[in-house]
Image (spheres, grey):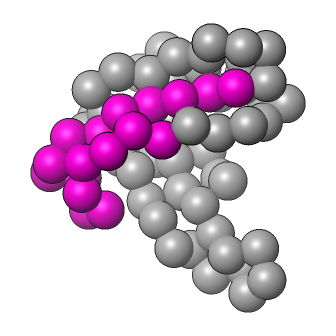
Amino acid sequence: MLVSRDLISFEDPKTNILKYDFPVWLMRRFGKKVPDGFYFECGRKCPNGEGFINCKTKSAKEIHKMISRK
């Protein structure tokens, strides 16, 4: 998972090729429910379609802070 202020991307761990991009401005909501969990919901205009994404990461707090500033 690659995170910037404008985009969250996921890459294939075997090939390191980006597979999914989620622009922050197309997110409906996001947050963290557990210490190592981050979630977000994207609308239908997202390049990958609409949906709800749950991520398990030790950086959940930092990701939430970064996106909240946008």
Q: Which residue is found at the position 32% from the left and 45% from the top?
A: 51
Q: Nearer the viewer, residue 69 or 8?
A: 8
What stretch of residues is rendered in magenta? 37-53
Residue sitting at 77 percent across and 74 percent down? 13
At which x and y percent is residue 14?
Answer: 79, 83
* Viewer-side residue, 43 vs 4: 43
Residue 12 in the image, given as x and y percentages of width and height: 67, 75
Can residue 6 be seen?
no
Q: Does residue 49 appear in this view? A: yes
Which residue: 27% across, 26% down? Answer: 28
State the residue lying farthest toward the bottom. 15
Image position of 27 (left or right of 66): left
Indicate the quadrant where residue 21 lies.
bottom left
Horizontal relation, residue 8 to residue 58: left or right:
left
Q: Name the residue located 72 percent from the left edge and 79 percent from the top edge.
A: 16
Is 29 in the magenta?
A: no
